[in-house]
């Protein structure tokens, strides 16, 4: 199971890198594209078609409204309630975008299309791995699965890295093992807002704990309240710091449940 969850981590990291690379290509071709969130999913079929079927933003800007509306309706499978409004936004963005040379546009378009294809393939692989992890977890009964909204994949990632929870004397040792403990830099009248993780930590466990905490703060009122408090307290990197501190709070719950074998209770 650990091999599967670590491989999943590897896939997620690669998808993230490919998306960052894709955004740099999109900016090169269509610099104003991200200024307005025209599509809820920039990696959806309609968005992909718009970015690859038209060679340049000039071509988009010069396409008449009726033709572009038909294009949006076709690739959106008639799901958009306001295709005319979407078309107006697209044409406005095309007019605002920087223009690139036609000979460069062809190369950019090819690389952009190939990058999108890579992302699609990796996302399909991720779904297959998620299913395999869920099946593998059935052989490892545990109490973490009783926590709503965490799901089998994050549960498996946590269990695979912790192993026997009894090897940790307390939850603080588990948190340090996961890298959810910090070296404090301070003097008598100053404390740094930059407090790095311990380097000798388990990055896989930290990842799955943080992802589980993110799911909890989205669906659990107690964790959402804690996250909001820490978000307001943070001076820098507000979301990141609040989420990591929420994960640290979750460590206490995970440790107690795995050690006691008790089910989650609200």
Image (tube, helix red, strand yellow):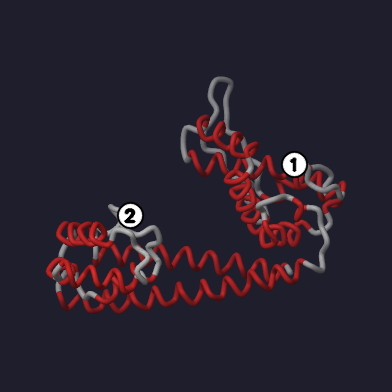
Residue 25 drawn above or below residue 174: below
Residue 10 drawn above or below residue 179: below
Q: Which residue is mark 2?
A: 37
- Tell which of 212 and 200 is nearer to you: 212
Count the labels in the image. 2
x, y percentage for residue 168? 82, 48
x, y percentage for residue 169? 84, 44
x, y percentage for residue 205? 68, 56
Residue 9 drawn above or below residue 228: below
Q: What residue appears at the point 72 percent right and 62 percent down from the top-left corner?
A: 156
x, y percentage for residue 105? 21, 74
At mark 2, the secondary structure is loop
- Tell which of 166 and 213 is nearer to you: 213
Query: What whole-number distance in Å separates the C-alpha atoms at marks 2 and 1?
Result: 39 Å
Q: Tell me the tag on residue 179.
A: none
Residue 200 can be seen in this image: no
Q: Which residue is mark 1?
A: 252
Which part of the image, by quadrant, shows the N terminus?
bottom right
Disc with the residue nearer the chain's start (2 vs 1):
2
């Amino acid at each position: 199971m650990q091999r599967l969850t670590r491989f999943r981590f590897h896939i997620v990291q690669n998808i993230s890198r490919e998306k960052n690379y894709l955004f740099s290509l999109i900016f090169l071709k269509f610099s104003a594209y991200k200024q307005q969130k025209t599509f809820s999913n920039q990696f959806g079929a309609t968005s992909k078609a718009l970015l690859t079927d038209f060679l340049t933003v000039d071509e988009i800007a010069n396409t008449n409204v009726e033709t572009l509306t038909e294009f949006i309706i076709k690739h959106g499978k008639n799901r958009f309630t306001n295709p005319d409004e979407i078309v107006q936004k697209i044409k406005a963005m095309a007019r605002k975008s920087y223009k690139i040379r036609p000979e460069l546009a062809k190369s950019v378009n090819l690389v952009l299309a190939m990058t999108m294809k890579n992302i699609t393939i990796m996302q399909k692989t991720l779904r297959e791995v998620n299913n395999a992890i869920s099946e593998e977890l059935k052989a490892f009964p545990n109490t973490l699965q009783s926590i709503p909204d965490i799901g089998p994949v994050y549960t498996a990632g946590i269990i695979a890295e912790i192993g026997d929870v009894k090897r940790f004397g307390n939850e603080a040792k588990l948190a340090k093992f996961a890298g959810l403990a910090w070296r404090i830099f301070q003097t008598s009248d100053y404390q740094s807002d930059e407090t790095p993780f311990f380097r000798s930590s388990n990055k896989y466990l930290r990842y799955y704990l943080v992802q589980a905490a993110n799911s909890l703060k989205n669906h659990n009122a107690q964790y959402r309240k804690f996250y909001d408090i820490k978000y307001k307290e943070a001076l820098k990197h507000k979301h990141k710091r609040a989420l990591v501190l929420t994960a640290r709070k979750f460590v206490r719950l995970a440790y107690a449940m795995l050690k006691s074998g008790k089910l989650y209770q609200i």
